[in-house]
Amino acid sequence: MRHFFKTLTLATALVSAVASVSVAADEPKKGGTLTMALQQTPRHLNPAVQSGTATGQPGTQLFASLLRYDHGWTPQPYLAESWNVSDDGLTVTVNLVKGATFHDGKPITSEDVAFSIDTVKANHPFKSMFAPVQSVETPDANTAVIKLSKPHPALLLAMSSQLLSIIPKHVYGDGQDPKKHPQNSENVVGSGPFKLVEFKRDQHVILERYDGFFMKGRPHLDKIVMRIIKDESARTIALESGELLVSGFEQNPRDLNRMKKNANLDVNNSGYAAIGPVNWVAFNTKDGKTSDVKVRQAIAYAIDRNFILKALMLGTIGASKTGIHPGSPFYNDGVEAYDLDLEKANKLLDDAGYKKGGDGMRFKLSIDYGWPAMKPFAEYVKPALKKIGIDVTVRSSADFPTWAKRISTHDFEMTMDNVFNWGDPVIGVHRTYNSKNIKKGVIWSNTQQYSNARVDELMDLAGATNDLEERKKYYAEMQVILAEELPLYPLFPSPYHTVSNKKVMNAPNSIWGTSSPLDNVWLK
């Protein structure tokens, strides 16, 4: 984005940061313990080699990134006090803050930045984040010069939050596999505002303030206790009682509406736009009845999205008409919405040659779901499609791996799914539609087997320019095509909320939600 790529000094950025958040009338108070929920047990605590919010929430406390983002998609300095992108977009120069140290007291240098980018590029599942990086030069300890094969508009976003954790070369450069390194979970040597006290699987992650943190006066908290509570009702009760002070990524509609009535809680959906979770019905576009675009369009017209939003989501979220999250600057609201229209749906099926039989049915289809939260939506599709003569079987899986194997090997007709945008479309959107990303056995690739040369071209164009307006045009056209051809039918973003006790000041509201550093959080 063009205005992102100007040199941003520390002083200028801090003014922007202060203006973008609600500053409490009181001065921040030092001390106290923040009790916070994690909904899953992290595989480990190093986001440099592991995606997912279970790792990301503790990981962004343990490891700093080069940049951080406010709720308005504007980059702010973090380990990088300033940065500059060359006019041709092929060189990004990052100037590090001076005096920053890892938790073992050793300095954070440009060598660690280069090592971290190389490690993420080689080991992180999001290969597109740093694919254009050819090399990282280190002319001095505080300067990293990133050389690119082509302009890479997603680079700055990929340098923030849990996507680029700066890890110590003197720890992880010992020749061991970084994905299995013992110090991913124990004796973690981080670069962030908090250091690890204890990680006890299925119980908690305990962090304490790193007194040598490079941002003066931060963090404010003494300690963060992240309790692993997988049951939604248990988290709600703990929040209502004050046993928990913060929980992010909350999305159960009944629990959210219940907690909104509690005078001691703030239930806030600000944030999470970069996580970008979108729920949809995905189609097998190569095999069977769903390979016919008229069938896919008829199904979309027969699904009442408004009913889902009101009756199932209880008004906690709005619609998403495309696979790009509505909170993204690239979202195109002007595409075909496929509002409920049974007459259109029936005509499409008639025109496609699928006539109703004596029992009123045209043909059979199945819809899969992979985890319990998706069950109500899959079950809703059955009676919705019966109205247009499609007999739907709802197919559950024994567990997530069973579902993932079915979908990734293309053994499905329709499935409910939830896929994250991860900030920039280059990172989390392209993978769903790129014809080169049809990879058998890989979940959350192009499992629909969708292929359109113009869509591929538009993604290539949008991913190779730093001009924000040009990128918006490319993605707008792409979304129009996708809305017509419907490899998937978008329904709604996940209604992620941060629930916090009102004694918690500066609860995170950035585009990364609670996968953001909590160094500025304090307790009244």
Image (spheres, rainbow, N blue to C red):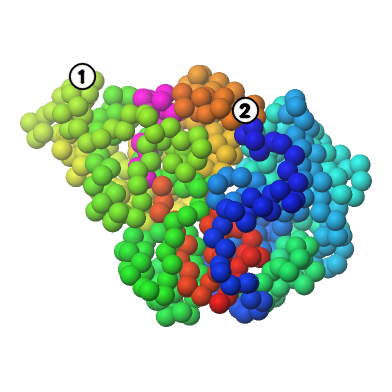
Specify whether residue 479 is painted magenta: yes
Q: Are marks 1 and 2 in contact (CB under 8 Å)?
A: no
The residue depicted at 42 percent of the width and 64 percent of the height is: 267
Residue lying farthest to the right in this orientation? 140
Question: In this picture, is 265 found above or below 464?
Answer: below
The residue depicted at 64 percent of the width and 43 percent of the height is: 157
Specify whether residue 452 is painted magenta: no
Q: How many marks?
A: 2
- Quarter where residue 334 is shown: top left
The residue depicted at 28 percent of the width and 42 percent of the height is: 305
Q: Is residue 456 left or right of residue 80?
A: left
Counting from the top left corner in percent of width and height, residue 226 is at 57, 72
Q: Which mark is residue 282?
A: none
Helix, strand or loop at disc 2? loop
The residue depicted at 47 percent of the width and 44 percent of the height is: 327
Counting from the top left corner in percent of width and height, residue 502 is at 47, 72
Disc 1: CA contacts within 10 A as few (<14), some (14-19) or many (>=20): few
Counting from the top left corner in percent of width and height, residue 346 is at 17, 28
Disc 2: CA contacts within 10 A as few (<14), some (14-19) or many (>=20): some
* Residue that mark 1 sits on: 351
- Tell me if residue 256 can be seen: yes
Question: Which one is nearer the viewer's eye here, 231 or 18?
Answer: 18
Q: Nearer the viewer, mark 1 or mark 2?
A: 2
Q: Which mark is residue 467?
A: 2
User: Residues in magenta?
Assistant: 478-492
Question: In this picture, is 252 found above or below 459?
Answer: below
Instruction: Report the amino acid beneath label 1.
Output: Asp
Helix, strand or loop at disc 1? helix
